[in-house]
Image (cartoon, rainbow, N blue to C red):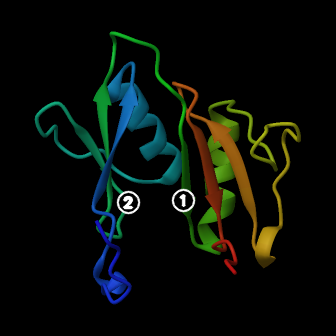
Amino acid sequence: MSYDQSYPHAGVQLNHTAVYASDRYLSAEFIAAILGLKVGAPFGPFLPVDLGNGVTLDYCEKRDEPIQPQHYAFLVPDEQFDAVIARLEVVEVTYYADPGHTDPGRVNDLFGGRGAYFDDPDGHNMEVMTRPYARP
C-alpha cells in the first residue's frame, strides 16, 4: 500500500463520530445543554447532537463493558464562551484550565483565546476553546 501525496486533503471532512455512553439520553442532553445545542431524533442506536458545522456526535449506549474516556474539543465563539462556563457552574460541573484537571475553576488563555476542560457523565474529557490550536 502506498500513500499518495497528491490526495486532495481539503475535500476530507469529519461527518460524525460515535460517542459511547452508559446512558445516551443523559450524555447527549448534557453536552447539548452545556453547549447550547439541541439533541436530534434517534437514528437507529444513535442519538445525535448536531454541532452546526455539518458534524454530529452520535451517542450510543455501551453497557457490556466500561466506557473508555475520550477527548472531544469544541471551538466556540468568544461571545458564547462565558455562557458555556455559566451553564457548567449552574449544574455544578467543575471545569479546569488544563487537560489533566489540576487547576479547577479556572480557564486558560492558550493561543490568544480562552479554554476550559470538564468531564461529561461518562468521564469523557470535554474541552471548549475560543481559538484553535496553532499547529506547526
Residue 5, numbered circle:
none
Is residue 21 shown left or right of residue 92?
A: left
Residue 27 to residue 135: above or below = above
Image coords of residue 40 (percent x, y): 23, 46
Point 35% across, 66% down: residue = 52
Location of residue 19 (image quadrant): top left
**Residue that sits furthest to the left in the current view:** 44
Provide the secondary structure element on which disc 1 rests: strand
Dot 2 amino acid type: Leu
Please name the residue that numbered disc 2 is placed on. 51
Image coords of residue 36 (percent x, y): 47, 53
**Residue that sits furthest to the front in the current view:** 1
Provide the secondary structure element on which disc 2 rests: loop
Dot 1 amino acid type: Phe
Q: How far apart are marks 1 and 2 (CA)?
A: 9 Å
Point 82% across, 50% down: residue = 97
Q: Residue 113 versus residue 8: which sits nearer the camera?
A: 8
Location of residue 81 (image quadrant): bottom right
Q: Residue 101 versus residue 104: which sits nearer the camera?
A: 101
Is residue 5 shown left or right of residue 92?
A: left
Image coords of residue 29 (percent x, y): 39, 36
**Residue that sits furthest to the right in the current view:** 103
* Pointer 1 with pointer 2, Cβ within 8 A: yes
Please name the residue that numbered disc 1 is placed on. 74
Disc 2 packing (10 Å; few <14; some 14–19; many ≥20): some
Question: In which quadrant of the rendered image does the C terminus lie?
Answer: bottom right
Tally of marks: 2
Is residue 65 shown left or right of residue 109?
A: left
Point 35% across, 74% down: residue = 3
Is residue 36 shown left or right of residue 129?
A: left
Question: In which quadrant of the rendered image does the N terminus lie?
Answer: bottom left
